[in-house]
Amino acid sequence: MTKYRTSLPQLNGDIFLTDGGLETTLIFKDGYELPEFAAFDLLKSKEGHDKLYKYFSRYAAIARDHDVGFVLESATWRASLDWGEKIGYTKEDLAGVNHKAIKLLQEVRNDYESENSKMVISACMGPRGDGYNPGDMMNEAEAERYHTTQIRTFAETAADFVSAFTITYAEEAIGLARAAKSSDMPVVISFTVETDGKLPSGKTLKEAVEIVDKATDKTPAYYMINCAHPTHFENALVSGESWVQRIRGIRGNASTKSHAELDESEELDDGNPVELGFQYKALKSMFPHLNVLGGCCGTDHRHVEEIARHVLAEN
């Protein structure tokens, strides 16, 4: 049974933390080999399940200790049809693993949620193609057909909403939003940007948000930005403009490197956690409506702890 699907608590404006870079932590810090960057593959074993539980519970404890909300983001960014097929998962296998991923988050919520720290379960989705390069772009209808399978699976679980991360072009976002609406699932769209603040497709954040909102009658509950350093997009956000108010969440990279540089890097660039905390504090000061805060590539619990410490000190 879902807990918050009909009333997402983060929409009330209270601060909600989320985790850091799951895949980069597992690969570079913990030494796991993730085929195609697929963290969900760990769910095939008890060891993997326990590792993911430990990972998420560490962040949940940070939120609980700071008396703020937390968004539990499932390890299913790659658990869609094309990516699953690349590593040997059938459609039925993927349905099972998507269910398992949400059940794991239910365990974490049962163990860590408190009256002052509401924990919302997000069913994480990723792009059909590469998260840095749009490549062969789908039209809106194709994107809706592709993503409907995974979203319908999540609708059967206790997930409160779906979040689509590292989206590189508007048409895929439109298809995702429509697929979620047809399954009565709240949806969040998170775009990624290059160092110039534009999507890899060349659209500005303003253009992307306005195009998706117009095409879907504002179906997304809100938007986010992920897999980019704050210095890459801070100048793209203009205070007072209505489209900026639609962006509630930030999951920034620790590194200032471009996507191309990160793709070629053999070592993890985990940046400076304290500096990142200050940068989030500055963003929150300029845009007080930002209230879903976490990390992406290269970040871990240290970065999220610093984000919480600096942002909460401001409030």
Image (cartoon, rainbow, N blue to C red):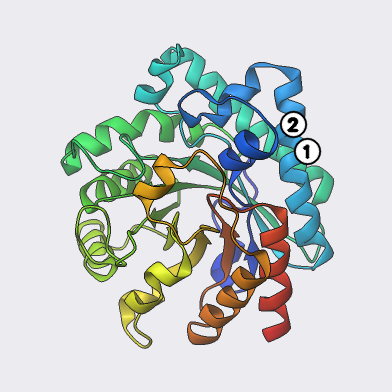
Q: Hey, which quadrant is residue 270 in on the image? A: bottom right
Q: Residue at x 63, y 64 (%)?
A: 272
Query: In the current view of this chain or complex, which residue is farthest to the left?
Result: 139
| Marker disc for residue 254 | none
Identify the element where label 1 is drawn.
helix
Q: Quadrant of the C terminus?
A: bottom right
In the rendered structure, the answer to whether residue 94 lies left or right of residue 293 reads left
In the rendered structure, the answer to whether residue 217 lies left or right of residue 260 reads left
Tell me where residue 188 appears, x and y as whole percent: 43, 54
Task: Using the image, determine if residue 211 lies above or below residue 170.
Answer: below
Identify the element where label 2 is drawn.
helix
In the rendered structure, the answer to whether residue 266 lies left or right of residue 110 reads left
Residue carrying label 2: 51
Q: Residue at x 35, y 78 (%)?
A: 235
User: Is disc 2 surrounded by few (<14), some (14 to 19) or many (20+) residues within 10 Å?
Assistant: some
Whole-number angstrom distance, CA of label 2 to CA of label 1: 5 Å
Tell me where residue 194 appears, x and y as whole percent: 32, 59
Q: Residue at x 23, y 53 (%)?
A: 170
Residue carrying label 1: 54
Under mark 2, the amino acid is Lys
Q: Hey, which quadrant is residue 231 in on the image? A: bottom left
Q: Is residue 264 visible?
A: yes
In the rendered structure, the answer to whether residue 172 lies left or right of residue 157 reads left
Task: Using the image, determine if residue 124 lies above or below residue 244.
Answer: above
Tell me where residue 172 appears, x and y as whole percent: 26, 45
Total number of numbered labels? 2
In front: 284, or 70?
284
Under mark 1, the amino acid is Lys
Task: Using the image, determine if residue 60 lies above or below residue 33.
Answer: below
- The answer to whether mark 2 and mark 1 are in CB contact below 8 A is yes
